[in-house]
Image (cartoon, rainbow, N blue to C red):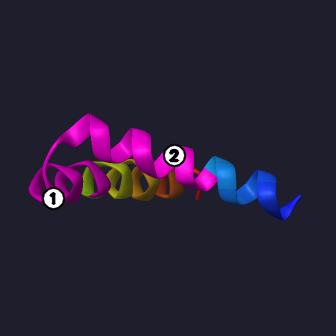
Amino acid sequence: MNKLLITLATLAAVLALSGCNTIEGMGKDIGKAGDKIEETAKKSK
């Protein structure tokens, strides 16, 4: 189970890093994801 979790986390990290090309781009992507989570949380109240 731990190996599967580590493998999936690694794969997700690789895909995220390859999709944004730079640290700045990654920061923007993470910020957008945070905004969506915050928006969904506000709607569910």
Few, some or many residues within 10 Å of mark 2 (<14, 14–19, 20+): few
In this rendering, position of residue 16 left or right of residue 27:
right
In this rendering, position of residue 35 left or right of residue 44:
left
Q: Is residue 13 located in the magenta-colored stretch of the structure?
A: yes
Q: Which residue is mark 2?
A: 12
**Snapshot quadrant of residue 15:** top left
Residue at 22% x, 53% y is: 26
Q: Position of residue 37 (x, y in %)?
A: 45, 54
Q: Position of residue 33 (x, y in %)?
A: 36, 50
Span highlighted in magenta in the image: 9-30
Q: Position of residue 13 (x, y in %)?
A: 45, 51
For label 2, the SS is: helix
The amino acid type of the residue labelled 2 equals Ala
Which quadrant of the figure contains the N terminus? bottom right
Tag 1 or tag 2, which sits nearer the N-term?
2
Which quadrant of the figure contains the C terminus? bottom right
19 in relation to 36, above or below = above
For label 1, the SS is: helix
Q: How many marks?
A: 2
| Magenta-drawn stretch, dominant element (helix, strand or loop) | helix
The amino acid type of the residue labelled 1 equals Ile
Q: Which residue is mark 1?
A: 23
Residue at 18% x, 53% y is: 28
Residue at 60% x, 55% y is: 9
Q: Is residue 8 located in the magenta-colored stretch of the structure?
A: no
